Amino acid sequence: CVVALEEIGDISDDIYGRALEKFKDPDWREMFIAMSSDRRRGWLFRL
């Protein structure tokens, strides 16, 4: 998940930290990896 998160690029440290908190849950990790890159970006900005 972290590799996919890093590939997105220009996200704030705040959003990055919130995503890492979500990734503690295996269900969130699985959903994030299954998303397209566009959906991942949208999901991040709604955290």
Image (tube, rainbow, N blue to C red):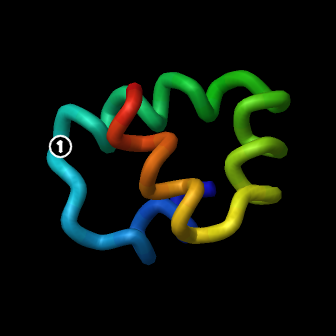
* Residue linked to disc 1: 13
Which residue is located at x 42 percent, y 42 percent? 44
Q: Secondary structure at mark 1?
A: helix
Q: Which amino acid type is shown beneath numbered disc 1?
A: Asp
Choose top left, top right, bottom left or bottom right for residue 18.
top left
Left or right: residue 3 versus residue 34 is left
Q: Position of residue 17 (x, y in %)?
A: 32, 33
Left or right: residue 19 versus residue 32 is left
Left or right: residue 47 versus residue 34 is left
**Which of these two is toward me, 16 or 45?**
45
Choose top left, top right, bottom left or bottom right for residue 9.
bottom left
Left or right: residue 6 versus residue 4 is left
Instruction: Tell me if mark 1 has few (under 14), some (14-19) or many (20+) residues whose alpha carbon lies within 10 angstroms of its own.
Output: few
Up-down relation of residue 45 to residue 33 (above or below)? above
Choose top left, top right, bottom left or bottom right for residue 28.
top right
Which residue is located at x 73 percent, y 41 percent? 29
The C terminus, quarter of image: top left
Up-down relation of residue 18 to residue 7 (above or below)? above
Q: Position of residue 14 (x, y in %)?
A: 19, 33
Q: Position of residue 41 (x, y in %)?
A: 44, 56
